[in-house]
Amino acid sequence: MGIKEKVSQLFIVRCPDTWEDIDYFLRQKVGGFMIGKGGEIVSKKQFALEGNSKESLKQFIERLKEKNERFGNEKLFLAIDGEGGKYFNRLKEFTSLREQRYYGELYEETRDVSKYSEDVSEFFEVMVYIGFNMNFAPVVDVAMENYKGYVAEEKIKIEAKELTQSEIASSRRAYSDKPAVVKTLSQIPLREMKKRKIIGTCKHFPSYGYLPVDKNPHEVLATLNVSKKKLVELISPYEFLIKLGLCPMIMKGHVISPLSNVLNSTSNEVEKFLREKFSFNGLSIVDELNMGAVRQFYGENYVKKAAVDAAYANDIILISHPETFIPMRDTIMKKAERDKGLVEKIDESLERIYKAKDPLLY
């Protein structure tokens, strides 16, 4: 495999809206597709391509896999944002999974997890039926008490006509402001996914739960302005889940924190911290690389600058804007041609990627 194909394997790209474009990406040997654009409402073009039922999505995924196999490619990561609720849930039309905070409130009141266990089990059975093998969930951010920011009750900036009122109102993404509750509940979906050979994701390291209320990483760069002692508390669910063997992938957030004075999602310091301090040996993935926080941190030509740093500091690069794939991929490739250290890092990432893909539901 040449360097171009190797770098292409690092990318998970939002699935394009036409089969012609999908074929193009498959020829490039892209590593995977995200079905739906993060938490945003899926476009009319995507609905036209994929449909909006279990059967239509199943047929779409089967055709996608068949095409990929005809191109002689490695297995694809086929991912969704399946946190639950009305917004971060591509499968909301035919599953019962509510937003994470709902289950956090239920557990804090009753200490009963049976309802959550039942709902996540149903959700992942649907994922298996359709053919998805990766889920960008659960959110293990510990939220600030009464938090009204990004992982709690975010006002979503999108055309109102495309949203229902309930989707505009809130997303309630964090389980709780209590680390113990986050640790207890996050195990449940991670165990269920592991049992079904679906890669779950612990996100957003180190945390979005203590960002200023008006700082949405989709729009602006924010600083996680907490003490080192508080930071230890916020990241404790990650260490806990890693020790349990329940953390196959960590998504890094676009913040500045006490861990590093540069963007944490593309920081070698943060990657080193996870590998050495927490003995993490799973996949690291950068949060969507076209977000406003990234543009603000890197400034002009952010696409190319961020891509190179992301390749040094992560195994997988997630992008929601497919048109940025070629400039990102080619910039990393050119840098690798001059830097043996980057080639070694890419090979190391691919070793983890192929190890993760081998047993996957496919």
Image (cartoon, rainbow, N blue to C red):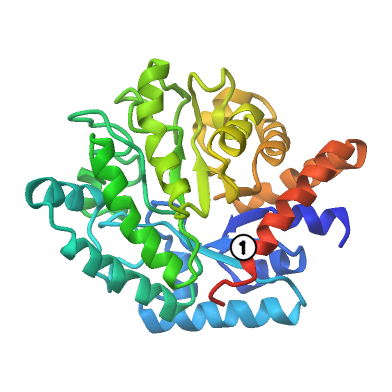
Q: Quadrant of the C terminus?
A: bottom right
Residue 249: give x, y in percent of width and height.
52, 51
User: For the point 70% across and 30% down, which residue is it?
Assistant: 301
**Where 74 falls versus 41 (above or below)?**
below
Point out residue 161 in the picture as x, y percentages from the top left corner: 28, 52
Q: Amino acid at mark 1?
A: Ala
Residue 250 lies, with reference to residue 309, above or below; the image says below
Residue at image coords 53%, 37%: 278
Q: Nearer the viewer, residue 221 or 326?
A: 221
Instruction: Please give left or right for residue 340 compared with residue 18 in the image.
Output: right
Q: Inspect this view and state whether residue 57 appears.
A: no
Q: Seen from this angle, which residue lies furthest right? A: 338
For the residue pair 335 and 120, the one nearer the viewer reads as: 120
**Residue holding disc 1:** 356
Of residues 204 and 344, the one nearer the viewer is 344
Q: Secondary structure at mark 1?
A: helix
Residue found farthest to the left: 109
Image x and y of residue 119, in percent: 24, 67
Q: What residue is shown at x 47% (from left), y 54% (from top)?
A: 245
Residue 148 falls in which quadrant of the image? Answer: top left
Q: Please say if 110 is above or below 292.
A: below
Q: Nearer the viewer, residue 173 or 21?
A: 173
